[in-house]
Image (tube, grey):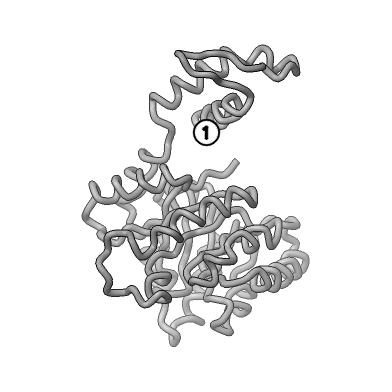
Amino acid sequence: MSRFRSLLFVPGINPRFVDKAKKLNADIICFDLEDSVLPSEKVTARKMLVQALKQRANYNLTENVYVRINSPESGISGKDLTSTVQKGLDGIVVPKVSEESEIVELCSLITGLEQKRRIEKNHIKLMPSIETAKGVVNAHSIARADLRVNSLIFGLYDFLHDMHLDHADNDGTGYSYARWKIPVDARAAGVVAIDAIWQKVDDIPGLRKDAASAKRLGYVGKSIIHPNHIDPVHEIFKPSKIEIGWATKVVNVLGPAMRKGKGGGVVKLEGKMIDAAHYKQAKAILDIVNQ
């Protein structure tokens, strides 16, 4: 099972950063072809990432290597895929997704490239990034668009721009609905949600607070833009000692009956009633711990 605690964006045009990523332990390293690459440098960046993916075995501290392509509306996302879908790539981040059809079209192209390049069918996963009002409205259908989709990402700053809130007071009012809705839509579609970046690179206490808020909303991880954010984010998104203790007690109390197929019934634990739903939740927590 893949972990999604940290999604680290690495500029795809910077050789030093691309090479440094080999030594980083983010759950997902994502080489960027979008915002961090000028239009005049797209071709050069693609070539650089092709070489980086050939060295995939050297990126041995991360579970997955992804590439963020340019948006479907850019007109060049197909060129990005044609260059980078190869052995060594685990997934694609698709920015500014507004509707299901955009994912369906990209998946069709990826399927053809997998066949042509002898990559295992459906190996390449997709992370649509929700960054527009239309994307927020359609988030559930986007998450269900194809089996390749394994998560939704909240793209906060482009969302604020789309809502004409770039310079509004940043107290959360302008984006709270979107931030709350995306993990619900993701969960309903059977995938996970990854929260937006924390822009203040040196404000680690602020990062921790923001990540903790995201966890309480149902996000399983966070997009990040600096290696110094990896460990704090991992710390926040791992189960706490209190969560682990509770989960262990629930499994010990309900486990025997559940394993015998009796459903476990309803029992009291420390003054609170627990049942099969709590057992599933507890098992999920312990599964994360044991990864």
Q: Nearer the viewer, residue 56 or 215?
A: 215
Q: Position of residue 271 (x, y in %)?
A: 46, 14
Residue 226 position, x and y percent, is: 33, 57
For the residue labelled by badge 1, is the local secondary structure a helix, a strand or a loop?
A: helix
> Is residue 33 toward the left or the right of residue 124 in the image?
left
202 in relation to 254, above or below: below
Quarter-of-image position of residue 223: bottom left
Residue at screen point 48% across, 72% down: 132
**Residue closest to the eye, 205 or 214:** 214
The residue that label 1 is drawn on is 288
In the image, taking residue 92 as reference, residue 22 lies left or right, namely: left
Q: Is residue 114 visible?
A: yes
Percent from the top left, x then y, of residue 274? 56, 20
164 lies above or below 30: below
Left or right side of 291 for 177: left
- Is residue 170 depicted above or below 276 in this figure? below
Residue 291 at x, y percent in the picture:
54, 33
